[in-house]
């Protein structure tokens, strides 16, 4: 790969990673511990990631079990989950917290599928913006240095191929998540 394309490849890679992280946080009626990734718990005055203060497991397809390493954290974890936008009610028995995922309605599944597609479209727009940024920089190169028209054309073609590759990966990720969301 041409050195002038590397930075744009990295940017496109980051856009794809960002989408994958966003899609992982969408709950699809099944227990997925990644929905807790953004939850922070007040641990001795410091906002700390939930996974750093508790053991998170999935004993059943629609339940997450959270076992804090210190019993005093049960209330803090419960509070953090209630104030988050997860829409789940934690059940605690004094030592552990159970998050039970209700079965999603057909309407809610369709809403989530639309949301997944929208996030995919936003990622595609980001990729195309990066391609445009790359092409603009190539045009500036042609004015400022002694690079040939053919070299510029080759760079633009490579940028387009890179764009197509990432858009394909985005579509695959969106399709997989949509299928997961719509599967009962």
Image: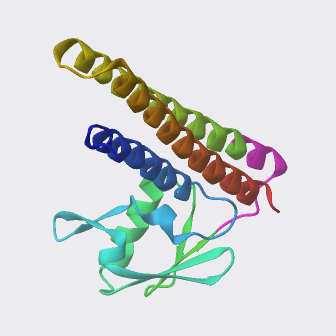
Q: Is residue 85 visible?
A: no
Q: Can residue 98 be seen in this view?
A: yes
From the viewer's perspective, tell me whether residue 181 is left or right of residue 66. right
Q: How many marks on residues? A: 0
Query: Residue at point 35% right, 48% down?
Result: 1
Picture quarter with the C terminus = bottom right
Query: Residue at point 38% right, 61% down?
Result: 39
Q: In which quarter of the image is residue 70?
A: bottom left
Q: Is residue 50 above or below residue 83?
A: below
Query: Residue at point 57% right, 64% down?
Result: 89
Q: In x, y percent, where is residue 73?
A: 32, 77
Q: In which quarter of the image is residue 28?
A: bottom right
Q: In x, y percent, where is residue 22?
A: 49, 50
Q: In x, y percent, where is residue 119?
A: 56, 39
Residue 10 highlighted magenta (yes or no): no
In the foreground, 144 or 100: 144
């Amino acid at each position: 790969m041409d050195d002038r394309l590397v930075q744009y490849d990295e940017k496109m890679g980051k856009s794809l990673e960002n989408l994958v992280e966003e899609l992982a946080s969408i709950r699809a009626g099944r227990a997925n511990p990644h929905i807790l990734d953004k939850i922070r718990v007040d641990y001795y005055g410091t906002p700390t990631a939930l996974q750093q203060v508790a053991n998170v497991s999935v004993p059943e397809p629609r339940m997450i079990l959270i076992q804090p390493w210190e019993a005093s954290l049960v209330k803090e974890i419960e509070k953090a989950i209630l104030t988050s936008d997860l829409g789940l009610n934690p059940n605690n028995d004094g030592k552990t917290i159970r998050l039970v995922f209700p079965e999603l309605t057909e309407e809610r599944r369709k809403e989530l599928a639309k949301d997944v597609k929208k996030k995919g479209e936003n990622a595609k727009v980001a990729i195309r913006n990066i391609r445009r940024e790359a092409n603009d920089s190539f045009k500036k190169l042609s004015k400022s240095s002694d690079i040939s028209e053919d070299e510029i054309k080759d760079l633009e073609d490579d940028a387009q191929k890179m764009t197509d590759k990432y858009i394909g990966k985005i579509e695959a990720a969106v399709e997989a998540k949509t299928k997961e969301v719509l599967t009962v």
